Amino acid sequence: MAFFNHLARRSFAQSAAMANAIKNVTVIGSGLMGSGIAQVAAQTGHNVTMVDIDPVAVEKAQKRIGASIARVAKKKFGEGDDAAKFMNESMSHLKTSTDAVASVESADLVVEAIVENLKVKKELFSKLDGAAPAHTIFASNTSSIPIAKIAEATSRLDRFGGLHFFNPVPVMKLLEVVRIPETSDGTYEAMKGWGKAMGKVTVECKDTPGFIVNRLLVPYMFEAVRLVERGEASPRDVDTAMKLGAGHPMGPFELMDYVGLDTGKFIIDGWHADYPDEEIFKPSPMLEKLVADGKLGVKSGEGFYSYKK
Ligand SMILES: C[C@H](O)CC(=O)SCCNC(=O)CCNC(=O)[C@H](O)C(C)(C)COP(=O)(O)OP(=O)(O)OC[C@H]1O[C@@H](n2cnc3c(N)ncnc32)[C@H](O)[C@@H]1OP(=O)(O)O
Ligand SMILES: NC(=O)c1ccc[n+]([C@@H]2O[C@H](COP(=O)([O-])OP(=O)(O)OC[C@H]3O[C@@H](n4cnc5c(N)ncnc54)[C@H](O)[C@@H]3O)[C@@H](O)[C@H]2O)c1
């Protein structure tokens, strides 16, 4: 018994050490998710580098982070000096870059939150694998792509996993921590420990399609789309029904606009390719048209609804 207690203590100590070892975090992608992850990492005292290939995206992300940190600071500290101190300290932990390779040179953890496309994600990780130190853990925030397929691009399968955050990251408490068969126990404990250090509640999940939340949420959202495409109800009424009848904070159309319709299309197209017989994953004419028209939801000013001021 004493021996097992000793082992348990040791493994706890090791995981605590690994989690504490994650100090320098590189977040690749400064869109909706990358900016949220970078913000929370900076707020919780990590040294963060947020990277995007698009300098305009970086600029927009900085503005979004500034506005969001101000909301968090007000909630935590009200209007006084402590709020200003929290904002300044958080921002002082955040650097930006457009050079992904140079940005991982001293990273303990790399969290990828770029476009939901396997080829693009693999190209990125393959470049980063040669540039990052041996100890660096790589994680993807993918919504729907198997982590194992992304990890194939690297030679560090034992230091690879999924860290799936939820939008808006500064508000949503959940973090799904995903392991592939090769993920080492040390890596997994470090990822979970980092999630806790970020103030998140972590749940564990294997590398199964959609993990937990999206396995349930994505079919739900696409059932709503089919309902409307069949002319059985309007988006507004579906949203009202799910908010008032099921207690959801947003209806499925509001939520799809919030997530981004391009991201929704990437998810469903990927699953359609993998599971061509599943009716629910077949292309939706309504979604195809909105995306083709550049109506990507809240982020572009219009999706199922208009957000133009
Ligand atoms: C597809 C992917 O793989 C997975 C996903 O991410 S799926 C999407 C998951 N996300 C959801 O389901 C979100 C559902 N929606 C919600 O929970 C809520 O509508 C919401 C939290 C987004 C907004 O809440 P709502 O009450 O409508 O608006 P609002 O009053 O502006 O915000 C509520 C609180 O959150 C804070 N907040 C909202 N957005 C914020 C942000 N971006 N940054 C910081 N704080 C924010 C507000 O300051 C406010 O704080 P308070 O309670 O102290 O006043
Ligand atoms: N939107 C959501 O609600 C949500 C929630 C959880 C997970 N995710 C996942 O997170 C990832 C990002 O989603 P998002 O909503 O933030 O997308 P987004 O479109 O808001 O941002 C993606 C960013 O990645 C950048 N980018 C593209 N290729 C790049 C590259 N090679 N190197 C560096 N930057 C690159 C783009 O310029 C863009 O700024 C996706 O995998 C998505 O499935 C999204």
Image (tube, rainbow, N blue to C red):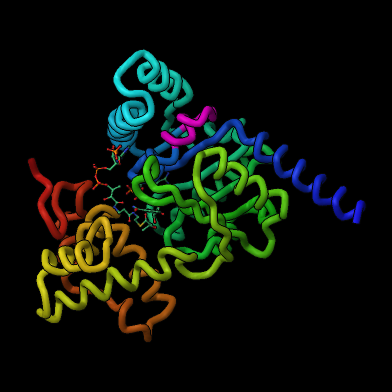
Q: Quadrant of residue 56?
A: top left
Determine whether, in the image, residue 192 is placed left or right of residue 65: right
Between 87 and 240, the residue placed more toward the observer is: 240
Q: Residue at left 59%, top 40%?
A: 109
State the extent of the magenta-drawn residues as a range: 38-49
**Image position, residue 182 (x, y; %):** 69, 61
Q: Quadrant of residue 80?
A: top left
Residue 118: in sight, yes or no?
yes
Q: Is residue 103 magenta?
A: no
Q: Quadrant of the C terminus?
A: top left
**Image position, residue 272 (x, y; %):** 36, 76
**Image position, residue 65 (x, y; %):** 34, 32
Q: Against 219, is 294 above or below? A: above
Task: Report the number of numbered marks.
Answer: 0
Between 230 and 148, the residue placed more toward the observer is: 230
Q: Residue furthest bottom?
A: 277
Residue 55: in sight, yes or no?
no
Q: Residue at left 36%, top 67%?
A: 217
Q: Residue furthest left?
A: 309
Determine whether, in the image, residue 195 is placed left or right of residue 186: left
Q: Quadrant of the N terminus?
A: bottom right
Q: Residue at left 67%, top 49%?
A: 189
Determine whether, in the image, residue 151 is placed left or right of residue 210: right
Q: Is residue 47 magenta?
A: yes
Determine whether, in the image, residue 173 is placed left or right of residue 290: right
Q: Quadrant of residue 75?
A: top left
Q: Against 66, is 192 above or below? A: below
Between 210 and 137, the residue placed more toward the observer is: 210
